[in-house]
């Protein structure tokens, strides 16, 4: 892969060994190995504050002692309702160090959802981030008879709170210090009592097809997977990672917190979800994992900045990215890159490509990892052209994250790579469904044995619901979700995700849902990228007063039509989209149309906007 990047710098390292067969055992052994070296950083009041392994351990031990003092013990569940902050990790590791079960709740969830998740998980202690999350907990606690204590991390604005069932995290830590004076070995004893087969964490599904299901993961499965990740990703104590995806999602919990715990990589926490673009430029991670929406947003930012650049700068970028694309094409084809082309690439980097990388914040990244949703192959190629390899991984909550991964030495855009060495993956010959089997596969769904039986068959194969294929090299491709495949009135099978990914490659489109099952032709519902479309409107003197008026402006509709036409040229006539409409409401994670990971819920959107969909076929 020479010509774009240093192959040696992206090869997995197999010499990292932290003993332990449960998550708390691995954590405490890692503390003994790493001591005063930095593990986590978080920005507070404009200053980055570092947490060493020893400082982290002291806080975890105090919180665990406090939990024990209030009667929390092995097998009980504690839930964490918070954004991605260091306190999330501290509370998670403390709960597990008590032998308890840790469950995460999205900070965007409504009070009714908080009630359902706490009730279903039999939560006895609820950690909340601040007054906003506390309000939700107080609203529903009367319906949660098992809930004994609510612990608040940030007490700003709550100094006068007087509630016997609510206490601050600092107060819990103080209680823990007192408890440990008389029970000095309590935490060590609880950690030693943990068994690999014990339930460790619950990860609730996003609930796109019904109520969220609590996926149960054992300590043994989590540790097995963390060690398995070490065969995929080149990461060690010298690396800087950015922690910003929701920690209640398997991607950040497993690939961020637990994998960094195993490898010793530094976790840098963003200030809040809105500051990700600024924080990534400050942190400049050396290993960067994100979901396609983030990669699309970065690409859009570069494209918008380019439109504001001078003609000379635009010309420099055009020539430079052309050189990058030429090398990327040769690398992907397995062909030798000439010395002359390598020399041109060095010039291209100095002229424009390094600036684009710095604008995003990936100028120190050895490689990028994308997962959790399909990504456009064109987007992967663009990052390759910048000189940064992008590796796609595929998995799901139930497989504890990655089950396939594209190797750094053989990137195939559009492919999710071969099966990882720690699990089996195969295609069901009858249905085309992708099946997974291994120790990483979850224990089942909490309180839902019938759903577990539907998902894991008698031979231990996890039925993923994804349809795919495998090529002669053992590389898998996702065709679509089984339930999402469209069969038009003319009998044509269409995989909507291919069209949707091409549309999302546009800087003006954030998400799209293709419609057409049992219909004469395809249509699409589009959610625009507010920031970029507003910029377009301002630059072109398009009048608008709010988000709704922006989506109704003729010039904006023409803009999206041109993006649609660009995509249609890549598909056969029967696969082309004939009509569209724009969602007129600016959606956030609090809206029912979006999952907490900001994906449109296909079925809900089709039901909610059925009248507008029918109008496109009138």
Image (cartoon, rainbow, N blue to C red):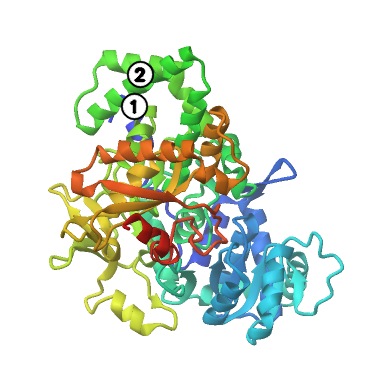
Which corner quadrant holds the C terminus?
A: bottom left
Residue 422 appears left or right of 65 = left
Mark 2 vs mark 1, CA separation in Å? 8 Å
Numbered badge on residue 4: 1
For the residue pair 77 and 608, the one nearer the viewer reads as 608
Specify whether residue 315 is in view.
Answer: yes
Q: Dot 1 lies on which element?
A: loop
Image x and y of residue 35, in percent: 60, 51
Image x and y of residue 396, in percent: 37, 62
For the residue pair 564 and 410, the one nearer the viewer reads as 564
Image x and y of residue 507, in percent: 44, 37
Q: Residue at x 81, y 65 (%)?
A: 158
Q: Residue at x 47, y 16 (%)?
A: 313
Q: How many numbered tags mark residues here?
A: 2
Numbered badge on residue 213: none
Query: Label 2 belongs to which residue?
Result: 345
Q: Residue at x 74, y 77 (%)?
A: 182
Other residues around mark 2 within 10 Å, as few (<14) / some (14–19) / many (≥20): many
Residue 243 appears left or right of 236 = right
The quadrant where residue 197 appears: bottom left
Q: Dot 2 lies on which element?
A: helix
């Amino acid at each position: 892969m020479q010509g774009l990047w240093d192959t040696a710098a992206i090869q997995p390292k197999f010499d990292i060994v932290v003993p332990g067969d449960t998550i708390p055992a691995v954590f405490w052994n890692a503390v003994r190995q790493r001591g005063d070296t930095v593990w986590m950083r978080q920005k507070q009041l404009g200053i980055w504050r570092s947490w060493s392994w020893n400082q982290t351990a002291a806080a975890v031990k105090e919180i665990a002692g406090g939990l024990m003092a209030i009667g929390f013990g092995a097998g009980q569940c504690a839930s964490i309702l918070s954004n991605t902050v260091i306190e999330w990790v501290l509370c998670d590791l403390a709960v597990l160090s008590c032998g308890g079960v840790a469950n995460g709740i999205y900070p965007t969830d409504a009070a009714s959802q908080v009630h359902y998740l706490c009730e279903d998980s039999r939560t006895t202690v609820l950690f909340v981030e601040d007054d906003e999350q506390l309000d939700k907990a107080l609203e529903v606690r009367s319906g949660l008879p098992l809930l004994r204590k609510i612990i608040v991390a940030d007490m700003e604005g709550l100094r006068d709170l007087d509630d016997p069932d609510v206490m601050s995290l600092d107060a819990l830590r103080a209680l823990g210090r007192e408890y440990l004076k008389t029970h000095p070995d309590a935490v060590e004893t609880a950690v030693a009592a943990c068994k690999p087969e014990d339930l460790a964490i619950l990860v609730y599904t996003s609930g796109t097809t019904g109520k969220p299901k609590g996926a149960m993961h054992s300590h043994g499965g989590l540790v097995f997977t963390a060690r398995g990740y070490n065969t995929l990703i080149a990461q060690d104590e010298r690396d800087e990672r950015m922690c910003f995806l929701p920690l209640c999602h398997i991607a950040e919990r497993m690939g961020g917190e637990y994998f960094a715990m195993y490898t010793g990589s530094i976790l840098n926490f963003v200030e809040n979800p809105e500051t990700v673009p600024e924080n990534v430029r400050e942190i400049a991670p050396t290993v960067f994992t994100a979901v396609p929406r983030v990669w699309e947003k970065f690409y859009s930012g570069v494209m918008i900045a380019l439109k504001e650049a001078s003609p000379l700068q635009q010309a420099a970028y055009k020539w430079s990215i052309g050189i990058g694309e030429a090398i990327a094409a040769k690398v992907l084809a397995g062909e030798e890159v000439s010395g002359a082309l390598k020399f041109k690439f060095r010039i291209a980097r100095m002229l424009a490509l390094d600036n684009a990388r710095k604008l995003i914040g990936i100028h120190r990244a050895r490689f990028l990892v994308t997962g959790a949703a399909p990504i456009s192959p064109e987007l992967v190629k663009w990052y390759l052209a910048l000189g940064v390899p992008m590796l796609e991984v595929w998995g799901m909550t139930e497989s504890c994250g990655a089950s396939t991964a594209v190797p750094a030495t053989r990137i195939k855009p559009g492919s999710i790579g071969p099966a990882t060495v720690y699990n089996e993956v195969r295609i069901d010959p009858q249905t085309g469904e992708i099946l997974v089997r291994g120790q990483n596969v979850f224990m089942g769904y909490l309180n839902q044995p019938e759903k577990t039986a539907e998902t894991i068959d008698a031979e231990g194969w996890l039925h993923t619901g994804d349809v795919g294929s495998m090529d002669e090299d053992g590389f898998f491709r996702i065709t679509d979700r089984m339930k999402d495949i469209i069969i038009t009135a003319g009998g044509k099978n269409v995989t909507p995700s291919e069209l949707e990914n091409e549309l999302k490659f546009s800087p003006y489109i954030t998400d799209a849902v293709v419609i057409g099952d049992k219909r004469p032709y395809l249509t699409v519902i589009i959610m625009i990228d507010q920031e970029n479309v507003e910029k377009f409107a301002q630059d072109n003197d398009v009048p608008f007063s709010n988000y709704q008026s922006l989506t109704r402006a003729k010039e904006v509709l023409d803009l999206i039509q041109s993006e649609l036409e660009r995509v249609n040229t890549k598909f056969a006539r029967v696969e082309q989209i004939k009509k569209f409409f724009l969602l007129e409401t600016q959606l956030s994670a609090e809206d029912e149309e979006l999952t907490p990971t900001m994906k449109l819920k296909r079925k809900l959107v089709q039901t909610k906007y059925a009248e507008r969909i029918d109008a496109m076929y009138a």
